[in-house]
Image: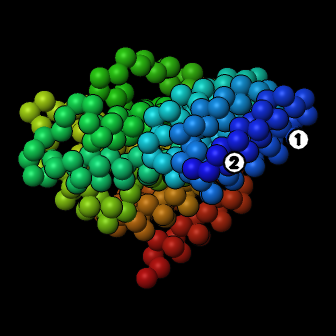
Amino acid sequence: MPAGQFERVAGLLRKATLSLDDTEKLNNLQQVKELITKYDSSLLDNFFEEVVAFQHYPNLAIKKFIVKFIEDACLVDAGLLLKSIGCLSHLFNLSLHQEPPLSSLLRSVILTMGPLYRRALTRAVKVGFIESGALGGSGIEAGSAADNAFEHFRSMAALKDEIIRLLLPGSVSVMQGTTLVPPPPVVLTRLCALISDGAKTSIIKLVEIPDMPNSLLKSIVESSTAASSSSPLPGICLIRPRRLADEAERLLAGLTSLPLRKSDEASVRFVVTGAVFDAIMDSLVNIAGQRPQFLDRAVQTFETVHGNFDCLLGFGCSILNSLKYFKYHSFSP
């Protein structure tokens, strides 16, 4: 690591800290990001937490920059995933509970969770099973690289669950071993009704991830069927194929029932808007394409929505467009 590069990054961070101009502050941070994620990733160990500390500045553009910085940094070095969870969770809850919610920041956090969840899962399989020797029955020691990989994934999965629970409160189970008590579904639905359609459709895209392609599931099955250890670690069960399959089933069931959800709560009507309905149809097409075993479920949803068309006329022409799109893609060769 050239000493000059270290000093340059340190100098840019000092300028960003001292600057009273948000545009100048952001420009300095962007230069830091380029230097430590693209040109010398060894500097991430030294400066990652210093950059992430800028999350506490009130400027919205800086907060969104920090989210993107975390994504890029974790894709370069997966070892930073655990350090990132606290910041992402803080920004998610901060944006959700503002009045009104900071939907653009919320959407940034949700969109970042997709690639980071995939990264954490891939690393848990690769480091946790394949490279650890678990496939040979040697077991996994607490505090080892494999154990850390599982813990990183466990933390990432917990935040992913918290986000999806906002849209599908009845479809996300509480993770085993956690002391978390989720808010009542009615509270989550009211919160969800307040956020933008863009944020809600981003959650729907996040729902697609546990419904992963069969090819990835096959690699997980092959990598995780061996005995793990005499004292199972909490993270191991999270990537068992059966658990992943159960999660996919629950989320798909929640997604398919969302357009027809009925409640006396007025907020429910503001959750599934025309744009959200379109996003649900798109996701069902994508899931059925990745997991052919879910095609029948997707077709059944199409038929149910079509049969309840009169109840859904409030969405206007988006219903017809979505049904045509869904039918075309579902039955295309």
Give amino acid for label 1: Thr
Q: Is residue 209 left or right of residue 222?
A: right
Residue at the front extreme of this rendering: 3
Q: Is residue 104 visible?
A: no
Q: Is residue 60 left or right of residue 107?
A: right
Label 1 to label 2: alpha-carbon separation: 25 Å
- Callout 2: few (<14), some (14-19), or many (20+) C-alpha neighbours within 10 Å? few
Name the disc covering residue 289, or none: none
Q: Residue at x 73, y 45 (%)?
A: 8
- What residue occupies the far right of the structure in this picture? 21
Give the number of the disc on residue 4: 2
Residue 110 position within the rendered picture, expressed as x and y whole percent measured from the top left? 59, 42
Where is residue 67 shown, x and y percent of the image?
64, 41
Total numbered circles: 2
Q: Is residue 273 above or below residue 214?
A: above
Identified at 53% across, 39% down, the residue is 45
Residue beneath disc 1: 23
Quadrant of the snapshot with the C terminus: bottom left
Q: Secondary structure at mark 2?
A: helix
Task: Please tell me which residue lies in front, 323 or 234.
Answer: 234
Q: Position of residue 131 (x, y in %)?
A: 24, 52
